[in-house]
Image (cartoon, helix red, strand yellow):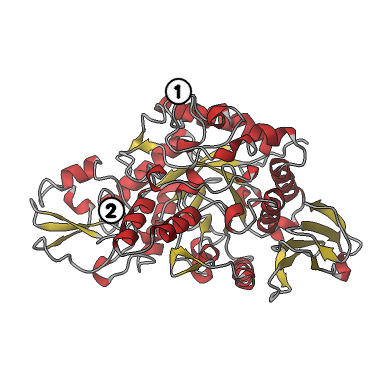
Amino acid sequence: MERQVLDKRKWGWWRSAVFYQVYPKSFQDTTGSGTGDLRGVISRLDYLERLGIDGIWLSPVCQSPQVDNGYDISDYRAIDPMYGAMEDMEELIREAKKRGISIIMDLVLNHCSDQHLWFREAKKSRENPYHDYFIWRDGDGVTPPNDLCSVFGGPAWTYMPELGQWYFHQFAPQQPDLNWENPTVRRELIAVVRFWVNKGVEGFRLDVIDQIAKEPDRKITINGPRLREYLEELSREGFREEGLVSVGEAWGADPERAKAYSASDGSELSMVFQFEHIGLDQKGEKWDTIPLPLPKLKECFRRWQQELHGVGWNSLFLNNHDLPRIVSRWGNDGEYRVESAKMLATMLFGLEGTPYIYQGEELGMTNIRLPIDGYRDLETLNLYRDRISRGYPEEEVLASIHARSRDNARTPMQWTKEENAGFTTGTPWLTVNPNYREINAQSALEDPNSVFHYYRELIRLRKTYPVFRDGSFTLLLGLDEKIFAYTRDTEKEHLLVVCSFSEETVPFTVPEAFRDGKTLLENRSWEPGVLKPYEARMIYSEA
């Protein structure tokens, strides 16, 4: 099957693209350190080319103390030694381009590390030129300026007694928030963007970018009043060049905001990551799980599909480095692992937007169950300590962690049946999932019916039929609790996508308009009048 390469000189090329997220720490180790590195990514480019992807979203590789796995950057213009050298990054960019693959770099512009030169200088005195790069409030060291809490638990303020001031951090205390109200800070960050563009990076995923316009005194930490002003400036000065992609992580986005952020004139962002669908199977905090309410999921997708159609652009994803494995979450990672992994991919790839595959998703990788001392994720460990201290039964706490921990996504990539799944010759930084002997890339490449080859076909179809990019969305069977079905339609093309979320055989009749249609893809053999457990299919017809 010949790979179709997009013309990236054309504005909006990403609307026909498929991106692949690499979490380099867990992708491929070439040194025996137990930690993945950039040369490991280079060594697997042929694999990614065969999959058919158009770009790599590369999770942070800048220099960092690794308090939050690289999302605490201490030098925006240096590669962390654990991943290699700048020469390795430059080679990765060159080698990826040879294969028609763009590097989309993960940049954290909301905050930096407390080890960054800016913060080390800022805490020396109130008169230091870097002091105003961060957010400070006077205080006595006893009562924080207000009761805002960090995402990782505890107050969002940390006291510096030598200054008599508190500084603000929405994440760990080692991740002080940058003061975007200071125009010098904005110029510094735009210069960082230009540095990497000049290196050949073709786009950016912007971490928690909807938090940059915070006003902590008013307890506004997301979607602040100056957010669009800041995004327009960043776009205008940083990446509004033909073909550059900008993807904003926006936990607080609704369709109305997303239409503005991702308007087709490119004035702010190319597209957004929004997370409304991801919270539907939780009660309150993410750790408290409930069964997925399928009608609510369908209504969520319907709203985003219809409200952004023609006026904005969305990212499509079910997995990333912060989320548990989707086949364990919304599928069946036992008897129907392969079928449900393919079904979930079918549901996602039929939608309007740009799909993102998280490493191992194309293999149907699953969650892992570890004892608490096996976890490395800061959020997970903080949750465990907090809930145990509040009297939660340990069994209940561990059940939540097994279902929701970010480390589920961060276990090493499963390449082969060999020791440590071919990820490293050393001791892996995080335990390899024991099922790697059954679930690995080597086996998937050899099996024409594998999840991997199903993803290859989905990618090919998206580039072959314009209806995937341009079609309007119509939801079918909105209240059905077992079937997710919808159509995508242009004047000339029509696509029916049908997905069963059930472990049982359920009745289903193909709509009359598609009964003579062409089956583009199916994960199970067709039996008229029913859908088998986790069955999925795409049927195509022309006007």
Residue 55 is at least partly visible in this image = yes
Residue at 25 percent across and 41 percent down: it is 116
**Residue wearing tag 2:** 178
Residue found at x 76% / y 58%: 535
The amino acid type of the residue labelled 1 equals Thr
Does 214 sit left or right of 144 as displayed? right
Front residue of 460/370: it is 370
- The residue labelled by disc 1 is 31
**Figure check: 523 above or below 218:** above
Seen in the picture, residue 173 relative to 59 is either above or below; the reply is below
Of residue 121 and residue 527, the one placed in the foreground of this image is 527
Q: Residues within 10 Å of mark 1 (few under 14, many from 20)?
A: some
Q: Position of residue 489 (x, y in %)?
A: 76, 65
Q: Position of residue 43 (x, y in %)?
A: 56, 26
Asked if residue 50 lies left or right of residue 42, the reply is right
Q: Residue type at mark 2? A: Leu
